[in-house]
Image (cartoon, rainbow, N blue to C red):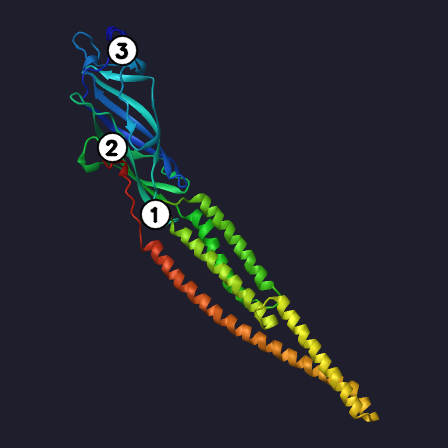
Amino acid sequence: MLIAKEALSQPQSPSCISNISLPLIVYETLSVDTKNLRFESRLQVILSWEDPDLSWDTSVYHHDMVVLPVSKIWTPELHVTNGVQTTMKHGNKDLLVHSNGTVEHMVIMNTVVGCEVNLYNYPFASDFCAIGINVWVLSGCGMFLNFGNVSTTNANRGDWLTEAVELNAKGGRDDRNYLWVSLKMRSENPFLSLVLPSILIIVSDVVSFALPLGGGERISFKVTLVLSFIMFLIILNDLLPGGQCSPIIRKHFCFCLVILVLSTLQSMVLTRLANCGTLRPCSLSKSKDSLLKDTDNEEVSKSDITVIKLKASEEEKMNTPLQKVVKFLNKMAAQDQKKARRHRFANKVDLICFFIYLTVLIVYAVVILYFSFGSSCEINHLEFWEY
């Protein structure tokens, strides 16, 4: 075709293109990186613009439209203002040119956008992210975008759901157009893998108060719970970042870890109190008990010697071993009573601590539910245009 040969003879720059139409944008969310606060998108964009240099007279060339290779025709280049990494490639090797100079083409854009997703209510998080699509605006002969319809495809990507995509312009300016992407987290997986285990660990710690103080079973069980919770806290730190709106679940895990450690320390102290009746170190208590025991033995031996010397009758000599047995049994009974009193006292203190612990957990549950569903944190997602 003659018109094609003339158009392909040498690439020409357009005289002046004032408007570039985007009749259709097909949006797709590829991934959401909550750790690095980025999300990747794919945009299939239909472009339409007028190039006067490509128009022809249909009375001379009897064709309303022709297909030309895209490598020989000038095509506009879109860019993402807040994009961290953006690639644009042609959807086809050819484009369609009408006789009036209208050119129709399709491009595919893959862009990684930095977006501080609001994870304050994680795992029940929902937020918006902006994708600023623009072209370079030149003085005199400028290029402006006219947007049409926006549709979405493959809305589910992992734990995130793309609810809607809208087209907006910041401040009504033609050079600040952006796609407003509404994202919502699918909370089933994070809830089952993080929130539910934390609740079950706290419930297990509450039930562990039913274990006896002596023997060490309760302490070993509580230490196991603390180690398990530390593992979940490490997993959470690998998943979620800090930032302006730090996830409230991070504070929840820190509080649960503190309350578990305090509960373990309380059980250790009360176990020591029930077994020894004192909070002093074991070495000091044992040395003091052995010293008292030696003193008692010396007094008993002295009294026995004195009694034998003063009353040396045969009958008293026969009753001396029996008296020693009776004294030993009385001493053992007194120690058992003393030990029983220590256990009763420790159990009473343990019961008081249990009710305090349970009250703190109930109050905390109300507070965390209020902050999880009744409060929010605001983030300015258009701060890249604050100039």
| Numbered circle sitting on residue 149 | 2
Q: Amino acid at mark 1?
A: Cys
Residue 181 placed where, x, y %?
30, 38
- Tag 1 residue: 245
Q: Secondary structure at mark 3?
A: loop
* Contact (Cβ within 8 Å) of mark 3 with mark 1: no
Q: Nearer the viewer, mark 1 or mark 2?
A: 1
Disc 3 versus disc 2: distance between alpha carbons?
A: 31 Å
Side of 30 where 262 appears, left or right: right
Compared to residue 356, the image places residue 185 above or below, namely above
In the figure, 186 relative to 144: above or below? Answer: below
- From the image, which quarter does the N terminus lie in? top left
Inter-mark Cα distance, 3 to 1 = 51 Å
Tell me, yes or no, if residue 345 can be seen here.
yes
Residue at x 57%, y 60% (from the top left corner): 221
User: Where does residue 65 sit, x and y in percent of width and height?
Assistant: 23, 15
Say few, some or many: other residues with alpha carbon within 10 Å of mark 3 (under 14 / 14 to 19 / 20 or more). few
| Residue 65 versus residue 171 in the image, above or below | above
Residue at image position (37%, 61%) is: 366
Q: What is the number of the mark on residue 90?
A: none
Question: Is residue 212 visible to us here?
Answer: no
SS type, badge 2: strand
Labelled pair 3, 2 in contact (Cβ < 8 Å)? no
Q: Earlier in the sequence, mark 3 or mark 1?
A: 3
Three-letter code for the amino acid on which mark 3 is drawn: Pro
Q: Residues within 10 Å of mark 2 (few under 14, many from 20)?
A: few
Q: Quadrant of residue 213?
A: bottom right
Q: Mark 2 is on which residue type?
A: Asn
Number of the label disc, if any, that sits on residue 11:
3
At horizontal 77% and vertical 89% (from top left) the residue drawn is 307
